[in-house]
């Protein structure tokens, strides 16, 4: 996630609190997320929501994906054929996600832009996108997701951006897991 110092729809988005911004931009949040979320009610809630709104085969967009921890946590419990599109503004976090996912999987086939993973009987196609989410089209018409999810991203975006995401997800009839 990049600092939000751009004008968006004619209104500058509010900046997050300094401590929150320092933590989020340091990369510690993405590194610590795996350990922090394991066994929490939040993970259980995410899983129940995803199980209910994720068809087979399904397409999922993970905004502000960090190192891919949400994929690793949820994918084994979802239907066996999945396509995850991981989006983050930090190329280093996306590279770390690629490496962690390949190590996590039972087997992996890598191409230049995607990986195909096998994990616990699931076939998971993973594509990656480094993007400034304040500028990206939030309809994701190129992906046609069934489910759009994010972890800690919503603490860092403006209300206007969040309203755009909700409207875009509703138009696509994609479930939105916040």
Image (cartoon, rainbow, N blue to C red):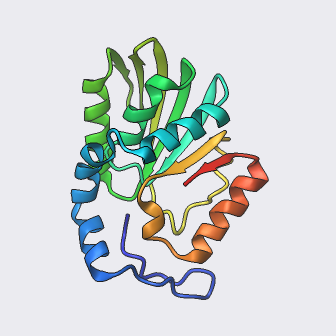
Q: How many labels were placed on the picture?
A: 0
For the N terminus, give its image quadrant. Answer: bottom left
Residue 63 seen by the camera: yes
Work out which residue is located at the far top of the displayed protein and give it: 121
Residue 33 or 3: which is nearer the viewer? Answer: 33
Quadrant of the rendered structure where residue 41 is? top left
Which residue is more in the foreground, 30 or 89? 30
Q: Position of residue 21 (x, y in %)?
A: 31, 74
Task: Looking at the picture, tell me which residue is in the foreground, 165 or 140.
Answer: 165
Residue 104 place in picture, x, y as percent: 28, 25
Residue at the farthest bottom position: 11
Compared across the picture, whether 175 is left or right of 25 comes to right
User: Can residue 132 be seen at all in this image of the molecule?
Assistant: no
- Against 15, residue 103 (above or below) is above
Q: Is residue 176 left or right of residue 47?
A: right
Q: Residue at x 34, y 18 (%)?
A: 108
Res. 107 image quadrant:
top left
Left/right of residue 75 with respect to residue 161 in the rendered view: left
In the picture, the quarter occupied by the C terminus is bottom right
Q: Position of residue 95 (x, y in %)?
A: 28, 43
Q: Position of residue 3 (x, y in %)?
A: 36, 75
Residue at image location 70% in from the left, 58% down from the top: 168
- Residue at figure coordinates x 25%, y 33% from the top left: 99
């Amino acid at each position: 996630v990049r600092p939000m110092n751009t004008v968006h729809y004619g209104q500058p988005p509010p900046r997050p609190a300094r401590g929150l911004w320092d933590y989020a931009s340091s990369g510690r949040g993405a590194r610590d997320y795996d350990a922090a979320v394991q066994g929490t009610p939040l993970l259980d809630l995410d899983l129940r929501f995803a199980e209910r709104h994720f068809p087979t085969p399904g397409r999922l967009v993970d905004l502000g994906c960090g190192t891919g921890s949400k994929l690793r946590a949820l994918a084994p419990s979802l239907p066996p054929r999945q396509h995850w599109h991981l989006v983050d503004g930090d190329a280093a976090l996306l590279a770390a996600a690629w490496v962690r996912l390949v190590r996590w999987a039972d087997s992996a086939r890598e191409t230049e832009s995607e990986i195909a993973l096998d994990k616990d009987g699931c076939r998971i196609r993973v594509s990656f996108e480094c993007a400034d989410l304040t500028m990206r089209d939030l309809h994701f018409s190129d992906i046609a997701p069934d489910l759009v999810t994010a972890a800690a991203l919503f603490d860092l975006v403006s209300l206007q951006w969040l309203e755009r995401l909700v409207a875009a997800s509703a138009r696509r009839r994609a479930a939105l897991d916040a």
